[in-house]
Image: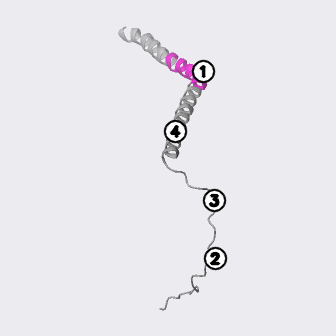
């Protein structure tokens, strides 16, 4: 008689476990797009903050250092010497 009483409680336990499992799966499918959107938004904010910090560092560096001129250097018209091509001897 003890065996008969345990079978319904075992089936009830299995049913509760399956109900919780499928319920969590269903909720996860509903919540997944919001979770992904939240994660991507946070990652985008971190990248934006890192880029702003980099821009501020480069601006501070540019202000503290004398910026080089952007002119193309003029070629010298002096003839220094003749080009000699060297070959290695085995």
Q: Which residue is mark 2?
A: 77
Q: Which residue is mark 4?
A: 56
**What is the quadrant of residue 45 in the picture?**
top right
Front residue of 17/59: it is 59
Q: Marks 3 and 2, Cα distance to the nearest angstrom? A: 18 Å
Q: Secondary structure at mark 4?
A: helix
Q: Which residue is mark 1?
A: 30
Q: Which residue is mark 3?
A: 71
The dot on residue 59 is none
Mark 2 or 1: the one toward you? 2
**Looking at the image, is mark 3 or mark 2 earlier in the sequence?**
3
Q: Quick check: marks 2 and 4 in contact, CB under 8 Å?
A: no
Left or right of 30 on screen, residue 50: left
Mark 3 or 1: the one toward you? 3
Q: Which residues are magenta?
A: 19-34
| Horizontal and vertical percent position of residue 43 | 54, 33
């Amino acid at each position: 008689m003890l065996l008969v009483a345990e079978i319904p409680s075992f089936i009830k336990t299995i049913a509760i476990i399956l109900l919780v499992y499928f319920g969590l799966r269903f909720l996860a499918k509903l919540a997944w797009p919001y979770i992904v959107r939240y994660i991507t938004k946070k990652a985008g904010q971190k990248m934006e903050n890192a880029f702003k910090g980099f821009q501020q560092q480069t601006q501070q560096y540019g202000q503290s250092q004398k910026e080089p001129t952007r002119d193309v250097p003029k070629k010298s018209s002096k003839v220094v010497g003749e080009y000699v091509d060297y070959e290695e001897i085995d």
